[in-house]
Amino acid sequence: MGSRSPPMLKGTHVEYSAEGFYKGLVEAGLIVPTRVPGTFGRNAVFEDVLARFDGLIGQLAKDDGAELFVFPPTIDRTIIERTAYLDSFPNLAGTVFSFFGNEKEAKALSAKVNGNEPWADTQGMTEVCLNPAACYPIYPTLAGALPENGRLITMFQWVYRHEPSLEPTRMQSFRVREFVKAGDPSSVVEWRDMWLKRGTTLLQELGLPAKADVAADPFFGRTGKMLAHAQIDQKLKFEVLIPVVSEEKPTACCSFNYHQDKFGGVFGINTADGQTAHTACLGFGLERCVMALFKTHGFAPADWPANVRKRLWPS
Amino acid sequence: MGSRSPPMLKGTHVEYSAEGFYKGLVEAGLIVPTRVPGTFGRNAVFEDVLARFDGLIGQLAKDDGAELFVFPPTIDRTIIERTAYLDSFPNLAGTVFSFFGNEKEAKALSAKVNGNEPWADTQGMTEVCLNPAACYPIYPTLAGALPENGRLITMFQWVYRHEPSLEPTRMQSFRVREFVKAGDPSSVVEWRDMWLKRGTTLLQELGLPAKADVAADPFFGRTGKMLAHAQIDQKLKFEVLIPVVSEEKPTACCSFNYHQDKFGGVFGINTADGQTAHTACLGFGLERCVMALFKTHGFAPADWPANVRKRLWPS
């Protein structure tokens, strides 16, 4: 942060800078900085926009018949073990450790902490990890035969990625409004395609310069590059992108993933006629969508365009 | 779970059983079991009651002028290091670990996970831990001189405790509606006393058999017993208790803590006239309050007493 930051807006020409945008969010009081990158607090204005935007998504989906669930930020560790998450994103996973010792060992732990010594060796792995993607906790609960038309789930979850960054859209913990469809391949793909249009339109109608594109996950290492190419070739992942901190590298605000029979196979999810179910998910990165609104329309929602305000705050 | 579970209600006589209550919540679809105790999903009905109850708390506080913040479930690890949390509750703290290795080490991690071998040794401690109590992340942000009348904060946070249990009110991850007051000792204590009455009354008006009492934290080990006695002697902690899974051991649904100058001292929070600020916090355990409603009024909100329904769903 400092005087080198470019001004956020110059007439109609938008300037993009991660540093400048972060500074703007902080100065407007929208986020509250903390010592660790990617763990800032959000204020009431930020939260109101987030809740209103989430409400709009809910309205779009209201006749779809999705079942709502909320799972905690900590989930069964075996989910990431069984789904090859650690093969693809070992660097992003957060595992939860705790202390399993007796009173004497607790004293040793205290002595280390209070003496500013490393204390990682006092901790053992627990049965939970942080939820790495909003859809993960639902799959084990879908095991068995699905109803005739499959199942449609929506969730509101906190997600964790170990990627500390001062770039404000790259958070360690963030919220996702997620939808998951499990069923036969064609209904799942059709549903994904419908939402890709619906999500892009929603963001565009809020005045955001949103564009959909084929995408790849940030697979780890050299093998990961090949996985990314295959994913793009098969068009398994799409994102809706909006420039927030960079015009050249717009921010993925919405992500659409077709898993084919991956989760169905791992967790024994079957269609009504006994085939391995296919699944797809899509998630709105809620903080990123909110930040896209602040970047595009300014830091004061009272000054946003009337049509945008009316959509978010209809009454 | 099984046929040994007593019926939940026999005429007007309420039977209490952790096992039976858990089974009832699952059968009503209100919670979705997972493999790891204390990490279940919540369904739309559960979430609606939770949001409505949280809204009532907000209404009670609406003229108090509290600033709202939401912090993520993962917070700066040095907060628990500096506040002696690990001296008192080493067994409850959850620390976040991740993988910091290169591609070769990632392959070794994959081999362990896919070979069903322990893989804790592939993980290193990150800069974040799970938030152990809703108020923790706010204190570092209050450093410096407070305004004349102190500061009043409200937060909505996910909190973690490493205490896996099949007792449904004892969750690993749960949500808390929190309030924190920082200022001079008398205003802080007066505010705490006001909320103790307000919180108890709110729960009683919802038909819940709520009672306030002096309480102690579950400090670890033998030294912990002395700390608990001192806390009770000084009346530093109160709880509002409601029978949910046991009549003899009612569940703490709301907790009030007067920290004296502890956090003020650690984080350099001062009153406007330069004294170390005192702080107090209070939190509604939202899932526990919701469960108290289900236990007391039954698993179907449509059948709850009219006055309770009118309070939660006024329009």
Image (spheres, coloured by chain):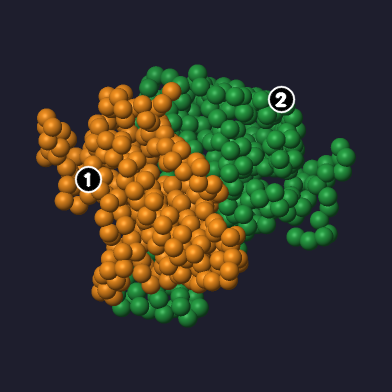
Chain colours: A orange, B green
Q: Which residue is mark 1?
A: A243
Q: Secondary structure at mark 2?
A: helix
Taking depth in this image into account, of A284 and A110 the one nearest to the observer is A284
Q: Is residue B222 visible?
A: yes
Measuring 60% from the left and 60% from the top, which residue is drawn there?
Answer: A147
Query: What distance separates the C-alpha of mark 1 from that of mark 2?
Result: 50 Å
Q: Is residue B129 visible?
A: no
Mark 1: which amino acid? Answer: Pro
Q: Position of residue A100 (x, y in %)?
A: 56, 64
Chain under label 2? B
Q: Position of residue B305 (x, y in %)?
A: 74, 30
Taking depth in this image into account, of B256 and A309 the one nearest to the observer is A309
Measuring 40% from the left and 69% from the top, which residue is drawn there?
Answer: A86
Taking depth in this image into account, of B25 and A232 the one nearest to the observer is A232
Q: Which mark is residue B195?
A: none
Q: Split into 4 quadrants, where in the image is the C terminus of chain A?
A: top left
Q: Which mark is residue B307?
A: 2
Q: Secondary structure at mark 1?
A: loop
Q: Quadrant of residue B45?
A: top right
Chain under label 1? A
Apparent side of residue A276 relative to residue A221 in the rendered image (left or right): right
Label 2 neighbour load within 10 Å: few <14, some 14-19, many 20+: few
Q: Position of residue B21 (x, y in %)?
A: 74, 49
Q: Is residue A128 above or below residue B62?
A: below
Apparent side of residue B199 relative to residue A187 in the rendered image (left or right): right
